[in-house]
Amino acid sequence: MNKKSVLQTLVIIVLLSMVISACGGTATQAPAPVETEPVAVATEAPAAGPTEMHMAAVLTVGLDNAWDRTFVESYKRVQAEKPHGLTISDLDYTENVWGDEAETVLRAYAESGKYDIIWAHSTYSDQVKNLKDEFPEIAWVVVGSGNEGLGGNVYWVYKRIHEPSYLMGILAGCSTKTNVIGAVGTYAYDDVNDEINAFFDGAKSVNPDVKQKVSFIESWYDPAKALEAGNAQIAAGVDHMDMIAESYEPCVENNILCYGIYQDYNFAAPENILTSALAFWDPDIKWVIDGWYSHKATGEPYNAPAEKHWFLMKDGASGLADFHGVDAKIPQECMDKFNQAKQDFMDGKLDVALNIEVPVSTP
């Protein structure tokens, strides 16, 4: 082969190699997958509940009065119990203020910014009505009869002790020797009337012919007026007395049996007070705390009912004090009737009617 042929052959080989390279190309690898963090979706965290609670109160008279004293004692029990895990401060309170003076005190508590709940322990709805909208984050409380139902951030607490009063009436009606029993009340309000009527109803359940004497001293606490009313009833033949007005000297001086109110009053007349209708405010205080806590934890508006609200004996809101041995003066037959009625009540077989009509004396 001559040189020219060799050169042509080489050129052809080179051209063929270039064509093959252009058609086939170089193989490439797919890019490696890149791992990425998942995208976080923003969610709203639930509101945390409060950890502390501070309360202030206005009391009707002070700790000499069982209505006020039993509330303060109940507050201390709830404080120790720590509902919702709350650290509850000691109760700050002011005694014996009414009308404009009460409103000034309530306003001062609210303006201080220290208190979550302000408890007005009687007929203070007129004063609270003027403050509740100005201080909407505060849970306000009014207690007992004579109040206006306001609802919203105002809780209306009632204390009913008609059930233990009925049981005391059984003892009085069964064991009276004069067949005349009495009651000395404060005001003729429905949460006083219910106790007196239940006392007489209990007595009449075992002694339909028993006569009743009723007095109201027109004061929440006036021992002198209560003493006078008690003595007048005793002069009319009363030998068992429901002393709601909290003056027990007539019981001792005339050696009759009396019944205490709200707290165990046996200490006032150890030989003459058979038992007492006890008031426990623990369920009421916890009910208000629950409403306040729910508002704070959820942000939902306060939704207190405008109607009065109370708990019963079965709820732990009332009870009977110990006899302290004075039951030795009661015939066994009467104790048996009392114990049977108490058991029937606890078993749900006995229903004590709520009667709020103004009680009157019978001839």
Image (cartoon, rainbow, N blue to C red):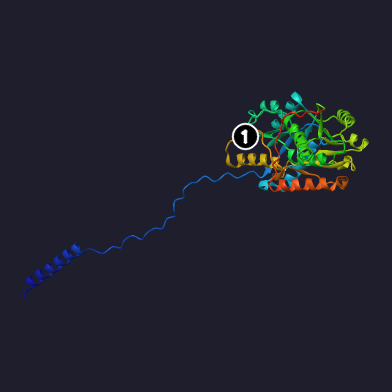
Mark 1, Cα crowd under 10 Å, few <14 / some 14-19 / many 20+, is some
Can you say which quadrant of the picture contains the N terminus?
bottom left
> Does dot 1 land on a helix, a strand or a loop?
loop
Q: Residue furthest front?
A: 209
The residue lying toward the viewer, choosing from 188 and 206, is: 206
Residue 108, how many percent across, how many down? 73, 29
Q: How many badges with numbers are in the image?
A: 1
The residue lying toward the viewer, choosing from 227 and 55, is: 227
Residue 203 quadrant = top right
Residue 191 quadrant = top right
Q: In this view, does 87 lie to the left or right of 10?
A: right
261 is higher (above) or lower (below) than 100: below
Q: Which residue appears at 10% of the width and 70% of the height?
A: 9
Q: Which residue lies furthest to the right in this view?
A: 253
110 is higher (above) or lower (below) than 26: above
Residue 205, how many percent across, how many down? 76, 39
Q: In this view, does 62 lie to the left or right of 254?
A: left
What amino acid does circle 1 point to? Pro
Q: Residue furthest top?
A: 100
Residue 261, how many percent across, how many down? 80, 38
Residue 108 seen in the figure = no
Q: Which residue appears at 14% of the width and 66% of the height?
A: 16
Residue 308, how many percent across, how many down? 66, 33
Residue 20 seen in the figure = yes
Can you say which quadrant of the picture contains the C terminus?
top right
The residue lying toward the viewer, choosing from 205 and 89, is: 205
Residue 20 quadrant = bottom left
Residue under numbered circle 1: 305
The residue lying toward the viewer, choosing from 3 and 345, is: 345
